[in-house]
Amino acid sequence: MASEGINQDLAPETFGKHTLKPLRASRGTLLLLVTVMLWLYRNHFQPVNVIIVILGFVWLALKGLSKTSLFTKNETSGEKPTLKRKARLITFLIAGFFTFVIISATLFINISPQVGGDSLDYDSLNYRDGAFQNLIPTDVSSENSSFWETMAAYMVSGEQRSPGAPLPTKEFILEPLESEEISVTWFGHSTILIRSNNVTILTDPLVGEDNMDPLFFGPSPFSLEFSYELEDLPPIDYVLISHDHYDHLDMGAIKELRDSKFYVPLGIKAHLLRWNVPGENVQELDWYDEVNVSEHLGFALTPAQHFSGRSLFNSDSTLWGSWVIELQNQSLFFSGDSGYTEEFKTIGEKYGPFDIAFLESGQYNQAWENIHMFPEQVVQAGIDLNTSVILPIHNSKYTLALHSWDEPLERVSGEGERRNMSVATPMIGETFILGGPIPNDAWWLNVSNASPSFLESNSFVGYLLPPLAVVGMFWMFTERNERSRTEEKNGLQNAPEEE
């Protein structure tokens, strides 16, 4: 028989035929993994870390399933799973994941009120083949960028896509107005309060600190020094909706505003009705439809170049658009979401000049250049509209694109100065009077330089990473050699005696 004197320091614990690996292997692997993830974190590759964590959960699930009797036909219980069984277990996990996603999505679409009402057919020149269309055929995805290129960019983007500290904001205070004055207050993203002595108007209401719907999957809003709720605002007379995407049509806000009057593009009324807004409080408009609310107030829905939809199966079932607001002999333009379009010139000729234009500037990318404007295009749109002032919106609330969070404000301001266009950059919550001094302080500059975390910035941690990686690899190497020697001795011990 083979010698029984195996060194107990090297011998692994055994359970039947299954060998339990020494702790040192896990220690070396864990140290190396933590070192790599810390390096990724310090270099702003957090999405890669997310993938590593997901793969870790998959690996743990695979290890757990391998200890069950699942797919053990023709295999001895307790043996190390064969490649064929591993492939079956991985297929099982993938199938289970997609089954969960499909069931969850189906339940959400058919049960959750977040999706809104059912789409209808519309007698509109802009509605063809069961869907609304842009004036010029427009693909959501650009031909100049591929899906995989964009996903890879999300993995390695080094931009500061969210602020490193709470954004400086102003506490909203309801100030009295003179008889002809109109005040403007921006609450981040596309939510704007327009107020006169007699009228209050709110665009695309989205306030509060909850995640953007649906459910908990939406991105969290940036942290603010002062937060805002609808109860902080004066009673809202009129609500203008640009389109039905979740970051512009929020079910919670709509329910709270149910007693206001809503003006919406075609199709969106069905959403509001499902959320218990009285039908008489909602009026739908097509592009270039106009409504005279009173002697001093009128609205017109104008085209935008975008798309709509609240689920996988109702894309473009509602119309999207921009708004012209005529209030007390002053003209305001609200773009909603839109790529740059020559139609801005038509709108400017028909309804301009404008005293101010709230223009979408943020969440742009080459991959969707047709449906979101780049900052330089925003200034050109302001020139086309013949507006006196631009206020860039659709920024400073969520991380939805690859650019740094403050880039839209910086680039629009710079391009406006270059092309002699006035650009208003109020702080969130700051109120100013239309026609008065324009707030144009670069309030975002100090925020982007906020102190990074200790692990991200400390030089000692950076110096420590290479030796930690070496130690981790050394532990893995020595344990592997020990395991090989142990397996060799076990093989000799279990070998049959020679006769």
Image (spheres, rainbow, N blue to C red):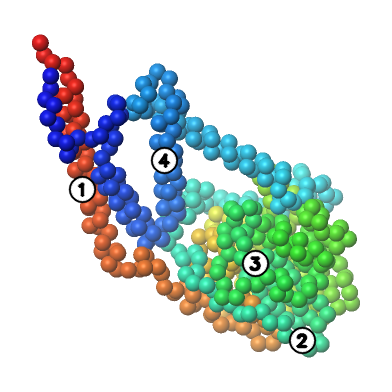
Instruction: Note whether 120 is above or below 467 in the view shown.
Output: above
- For the point 14% across and 31% down, the residue is 6
Q: How far apart are marks 2 and 1 (CA)?
A: 73 Å
Residue 135: which quarter of the image? bottom right
Of label 3 and label 2, which has the lower sequence position?
2
Q: Element at badge 3?
A: loop
- For the residues bearing labels 1 and 4, Cβ distance under 8 angstroms: no
Q: How crowded is mark 1: few (under 14 residues within 10 Å), some or many (20 or more)?
A: some
Mark 2 or mark 4, earlier in chain? 4
Question: Amino acid under label 1?
Answer: Phe
Task: Specify few, some or many for label 4: CA neighbours under 10 Å numbering under 14, 14-19, or 20 or more.
Answer: few
Q: Return the x and y of residue 232 as percentages of the image width and height.
A: 70, 75
Which of the two marks, 2 or 1, is nearer to us in this view? 1
Q: How far apart are marks 1 and 3 (CA)?
A: 51 Å
- Give the residue number, with chain letter if any, for mark 1: 474
Residue 413 at x, y = what percent? 56, 76
Query: Nearest the camera: 284 or 274?
Result: 274
Question: Which comes before the other along the chain, label 2 or label 1?
Answer: 2
Q: For mark 3, what is the residue?
A: 208
Helix or strand or loop: what does disc 1 sit on? helix
Left or right placement of residue 47 versus residue 111 in this view:
left
Instruction: Please state if 288 lies on the left or on the right of 448 as rendered.
Output: right
The numbered mark, 1 or 4, whose residue comes first in the sequence reads 4
Distance from disc 1 to disc 4, alpha carbons, whole Å, reads 24 Å
| Vertical comparison of 174 with 268: above or below | below
**Residue sitting at 86 percent across and 67 percent down?**
291
For the residues marked 3 and 4, what is the alpha-carbon distance in whole angstroms? 38 Å
**Among the 4 quarters of the image, the one containing residue 224:** bottom right
Name the residue tied to disc 4.
Answer: 60
Name the quadrant containing residue 287. Answer: bottom right
In space, the residues marked 2 and 4 are separated at their CA atoms by: 63 Å
* 152 to the left or right of 169: left
